[in-house]
Amino acid sequence: MTHVVTLIPGDGTGPEIVEATRRAIEATGVDIRWDTQQIGAAAIAAQGTPFPQAALDSIKRNKVALKGPLTTELGTGFRSVNVALRKEFDLYANLRPAKTYPGVRAPYGEVDLVIVRENIEDLYAGIEFDIGTPELVEVREAIEKASRATIRHDAAIAIKYISEMGSRRIVTFAFEHARANGRRKVTAVHKANIMKFADGLFLRVAREVAAQYPDIQFEDRIVDNMCMQLVQKPDLYDVLVLPNLYGDIVSDLCAGLVGGLGVAPGANIGEDVAVFEAIHGSAPKYAGQNKVNPMALMLAGVLMLRHLGEREAGDRLERAITDVIAEGKDVTYDLKADRDDPTAVGTREFADAVIRRMERVHA
Ligand code: NAD
């Protein structure tokens, strides 16, 4: 079966790691037709808009995209394309596995976690009121009237909202992911002891959803305690499900546990569309130098293959990547003990090594 996938090269070092990843995915033998589209800075340069209609139509049509990092230019008047993509396609689940691999320096021993972050609601919904605006005064007065609280007049206000529907679909996503991937436990992370209504609702819904999955253990943790426990005993945890803000912070904490952003893949998934990417940015200072590590995007490619139902090919690609980094020879500078090690290879050569490894397993 031919899969059609929208391929977004991105900018900065994006095109180099996307090309390396495309070659590695093709070496699995899975039949993919790439529909290449530009968004972000490359699209602004060519078409004057960060979000050309053709790219949107392509993602809508193909339902799966592999995306290189996009530079968010500060002060251009264009909002973050990454955030716009999430909103446009209602990509409500941010999936971030955090797994240690031999060959990657990780300070805390073996870790194998999956973070499921709600991607749309909470403090990140973008509902903010700046000081000095009439809207702020209106909102402050309404809040003071409804809650009998007083808010200082020199305070800006951001609104945190958490809905029943949003909580139900993200927790259900976490349980379905756990079930489909042989995971044993889901932990809901919250601060319901303080935010009794918003986080309290998230926790109540999480408990209701958990009751429908008797085959998977369920527990909850308060987010501050969760952070400490993840550092001290990450092996106690498996799949974590969190509202947006806690999810953002805890997923970076977990990336740190397994060796940093450079090795961490991610996926933004909605009902219809899924976009796979690396967690790191476009590292523009290394653009065009054939230097940076394509491993995180390749691991996002592994997630994508599994999403497409090509689980065996995904497993094979993951094994080839992990074999190459465990051997530690054909790896980029960031995976060498000394970052100035002259034996470090480039982006292309890392991909060559992964492809050779896959061919060897095939033979
Ligand atoms: P960055 O992740 O691009 O780079 C930070 C540093 O991490 C780099 O200088 C480099 O030393 C290292 N690094 C990053 N990726 C690496 C790789 N693959 N291999 C080896 N080393 C790597 O973060 P930044 O400099 O804060 O962001 C640059 C741009 O990327 C910004 O415009 C930011 O908005 C954007 N960004 C995009 C995404 C995305 O598209 N999903 C995510 C984060 C940041």
Image (spheres, rainbow, N blue to C red):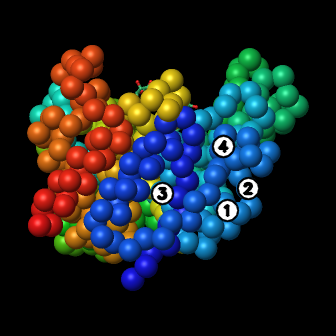
CA distance for labels 4 and 2: 11 Å
Q: Which residue sits furthest bottom? A: 1
Percent position of residue 239, x then y: 27, 54
- Name the kind of residue labelled 2 in the image: Pro
Q: Is residue 186 above or below residue 253?
A: below
Query: Which residue lies under the disc numbered 1?
Result: 56
User: Which of pointers 3 and 4 lies earlier in the amino acid sequence?
Assistant: 4
CA distance for labels 3 and 1: 13 Å
CA distance for labels 4 and 1: 15 Å
**Viewport quadrant of the N terminus:** bottom left
User: Which of pointers 2 and 3 lies earlier in the amino acid sequence?
Assistant: 2
Query: Which residue lies under the disc numbered 2?
Result: 52
Query: Which residue lies under the disc numbered 3?
Result: 66
User: Which of pointers 3 and 1 lies earlier in the amino acid sequence?
Assistant: 1
- Name the kind of residue labelled 3 in the image: Leu
The numbered dot on residue 42 is 4
User: Which of pointers 4 and 1 lies earlier in the amino acid sequence?
Assistant: 4
Percent position of residue 113, x then y: 24, 48
Secondary-structure class at tag 1: helix
Name the mark nearer the viewer: 3 or 4: 4
